[in-house]
Image (cartoon, rainbow, N blue to C red):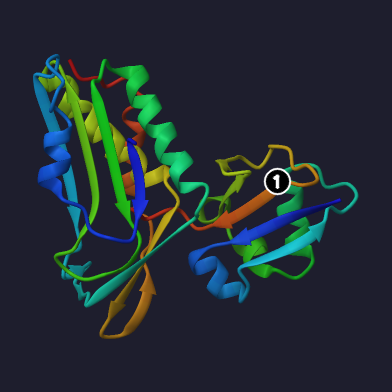
């Protein structure tokens, strides 16, 4: 059971990838836990970035760190938006 | 169709007319058009590229329109946002609202823009003499959006 992770804008440029597929690791059930897992894996942008600088969406909805991540979800990480 | 995310330009005359044509209840039409500036924070900008999150963007804009409709009694709402490469003078965004009276039309138009600025997944990358740079979000945009939470309403 995997999740799809997308990265956008400056975050994608810094990471050098736009998307990946990840088997949801044991013990990871919230967005905050997923962020910690990715940071521990070596994605230091997530470790350094305060919540202020990384936003997230699950299945096309903006979410908060406590929100649940489930198998099959599309999770997106991106900087604060700058449209308009 | 009240929301469009598109690469090509739009006709603000036609879009504005469509907000009241055949709608006898309409007494006010308020519109906002965003245009690419030739400079940002003192640095000249020769072009910008707007990236978005296909699939989420349309939904986010529709949510904003729905929220505006819950707050005010509106006739028609139109939101158009472009993506891709744009040059100074190019139109980026159009928000148009029609209602019976001007207070509601002005307020709802501003509300949609304020929410769009902080909730719609678009990101700007500017081409400057020092190279390309991603535009940083402004704290003032969060402030503009959050004042609607504090209960400011149009009449």
- The chain holding disc 1 is A
Q: Position of residue B24 (x, y in %)?
A: 12, 16
Total of numbered circles in the picture?
1
Residue B124: quadrant of the picture: bottom left
**x 59%, y 49%: residue:** A56
The residue where tag 1 is placed is A31
**x 45%, y 51%: residue:** B121
Q: Residue furthest bottom?
A: B130
Q: Position of residue A66 (x, y in %)?
A: 69, 37
Q: Toward the viewer: B74 or A62?
A: B74
Q: Toward the viewer: A50 or B5?
A: B5
Q: Position of residue B97 (x, y in %)?
A: 21, 30
Q: What element does badge 1 sit on?
A: helix
**In the rendered view, would you say B12 is above or below B131?**
above
| Any part of residue A28 in sight | yes
Q: Position of residue B41 (x, y in %)?
A: 22, 67
Residue A18: quadrant of the picture: bottom right
Q: Is residue B89 left or right of residue B148?
A: left
């Amino acid at each position: 059971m995997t999740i799809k992770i997308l990265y956008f804008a400056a975050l994608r440029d810094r990471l050098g990838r736009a998307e990946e597929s990840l088997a949801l690791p044991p013990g990871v059930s919230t967005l905050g836990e997923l962020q910690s897992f990715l940071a521990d894996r070596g994605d230091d942008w997530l470790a350094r970035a305060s919540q202020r600088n990384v936003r997230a969406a699950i299945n096309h909805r903006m979410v908060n760190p406590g929100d649940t991540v489930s198998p099959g979800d599309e999770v997106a990480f991106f900087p604060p938006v700058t449209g308009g | 169709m009240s929301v469009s995310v598109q690469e090509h330009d739009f006709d603000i005359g036609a879009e504005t007319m469509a907000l009241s044509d055949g709608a006898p209840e309409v007494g006010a039409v308020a519109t906002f058009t965003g245009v690419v500036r030739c400079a940002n924070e003192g640095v000249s900008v020769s072009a910008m590229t707007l990236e978005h999150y296909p699939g989420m963007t349309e939904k986010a804009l529709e949510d904003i329109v729905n929220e505006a409709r819950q707050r005010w009694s509106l006739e028609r709402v139109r939101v158009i946002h472009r993506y891709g490469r744009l040059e100074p003078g190019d139109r980026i965004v159009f928000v148009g609202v029609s209602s019976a009276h001007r207070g509601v039309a002005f307020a709802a138009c501003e509300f949609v823009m304020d929410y769009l600025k902080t909730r719609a997944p678009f990101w700007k990358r500017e081409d400057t003499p020092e190279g390309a740079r991603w535009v940083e979000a402004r704290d003032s945009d969060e402030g503009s959006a959050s004042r609607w939470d504090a209960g400011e309403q149009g009449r």
